[in-house]
Image (spheres, rainbow, N blue to C red):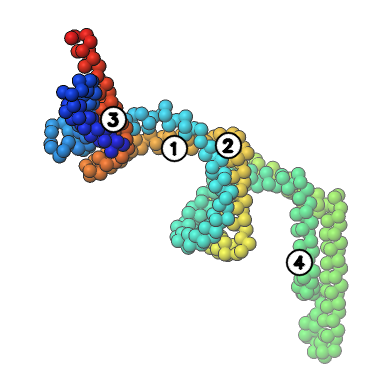
Amino acid sequence: MRWIATGALILCLIGMVCCRLGEAHWHWLVWPLAFFEAATVGALADWFAVVALFRHPMGVPIPHTAILPNNKARVAESLATFLEEGFLTEEQLGPRIRKIDFACMISRWLSANVENLGRRAAKFAPALIERIPSEQITILLTQRARHVILTANAAPLLAGGLQALTGNGRDREIFNSVVISFRDLIAENRETIHTKISEEIPISSDLLNAIPFLKNAAGPALDHFRNQIANAVANRTIEKIHTALNEACSNQEHPLWISFQTRLNRLVEDLESSPELSAKIRTMQEALANSPVVDGFSRRAWKELADFLKRDLADADSVILQKISEALLSASRELRENTPLREGTNAFIAGQVLGAALAAKPHIRELVTSTIKAWDAAEMTDKLEATVGTDLQFIRLNGTIVGGLIGLAIHALFVFVLK
C-alpha cells in the first residue's frame, strides 16, 4: 500500500509536469493540470501527516512530529486506562465469566486424570508421610484424645450404649458369651479346683503322725481316700456348674439370666441418674486422660497408621488409591449430574475469578504501561505501524484522489462562475 500511495504521488508529479509543459499547445490540459496540482498537494500533505505520527519526515525534527515515539508514556497510560475502564469492569467481564461452565470443565478434567492423580498420590504420599514430624503428630493426637476423654459425658453414653444392646437383643449374646467363657475357665482349671477341694478335706496321713506304724501302713490309704473324695466333689461341682450355666444360656427364665438382666437394667438407671456413679466415672476419665497410656496409644496409633498407609500405597492393588479414584469419579459425576451443586460451583468459581480479575486491574495496568514504556521507540513505531499502517496508506491514496477532485472543482468554479 505504501508503494501504491507513493506511486500515485509520482504519477501526479509527472502528470503535473507534462500538463505544464504542454499547456501552451493544448489549452485543455489546464483541467488535468488543476487535478494533478491539487492531487500532488493532497498526497504530500497526507504523507506528511501519516509520517509525522511515527517519525520525523525526511529525518528533520519538525515540532509535533514523531508523535507516537515521543509520547510513549502518554500512549501507555491512555491505553492502560482504556483497557481498565472499557474492558476490566463488572459489566464487561461479569456476564462472560458467568456463562462459563466451570463445573463441567472440572468434571471432565477429573474424569480424564483419575489414574494420573492416583499415580501422583502413590508417588508423593509416602515421602510426605515421612516428612511429617512424628512427635508433633503424637502430641496432637494425645491432646485430642485427652480432650475427647475429658469432655465426653461418659455416663449417659454408656447408658445409651447398654440400652441399645438391650433393645437389639445383644445383651443376651453378651450374657451367653460371658457364661461360656466362665464355663471354659472352670474346665481349664479343673486341677486347681480339685487341689483346693482336697486341701479343705480334713483327712490325710498327717493325722497318724503320733502313731508311726499306722502312718506308714494306713497313711497312703487315707491320702488316696481324700483324693478320691476331692475328685468326686470337684467333678460333681463342675458338672453342676456347667449344667446350670448351660441352662442359663438356653432358658430365658433362668435365675442367672434374670439376675444378670436386673443388674444390667439397674446399672443403666444408675448411669442415667446416680451422681455418685457419674462422679466415679468422671474420676476414671480424668485418670485415663492423665495416664501415660494415652501417649503410648497415640504414638502406636500414628506409627501403625503411617506404616499401613505406606504399605497400602506401595501395593499394586492399593485400597487407598481405589478409594481415591472412586471419590474422584464420584465428585466428577456429582459435578456433572447434580444441578444445584453444579450451579453453586459455577457461581462460586465465577465470583472468585471475577473478583481476582477486578482485583488485578492495578497489576494489569502496570503490566501494560511498563511493557509499552520499555519498548524501544523504533520497536513501538514498527508495532503500531504494522497494525494500522495499511489503513494510513489508504489515507494517503484517498488524499491524492480527493485533493485532485477538489482542485478540479475549484478550477471549474473560477472558469464558469467567477470568470
Residue 289, percent from left and from top: 53, 54
Is 374 positioned to the left or the right of 195 in the image?
Answer: left
The kind of residue on which mark 2 rests is: Leu
The kind of residue on which mark 4 rests is: Leu
Q: Is residue 17 visible?
A: yes
Q: Secondary structure at mark 1?
A: helix
Camera-nearest residue between 379 and 252:
379
Q: Give the Cα separation between the discs numbered 2 and 3.
A: 61 Å
Q: Quadrant of the C terminus?
A: top left
Quick one: label 1 or label 4, which is nearer the N terminus? 4
Residue at the spot of label 4: 185
Residue 335, percent from left and from top: 58, 40
- Front label number (3 vs 4): 3
User: For the point 16% across and 38% down, which residue is it?
Assistant: 58
Q: Give the Cα separation between the discs numbered 1 and 4.
A: 71 Å
The kind of residue on which mark 3 rests is: Leu
Residue at the spot of label 1: 353
Is 148 positioned to the left or the right of 187 in the image?
Answer: left
Q: Give the Cα separation between the discs numbered 2 and 1.
A: 18 Å
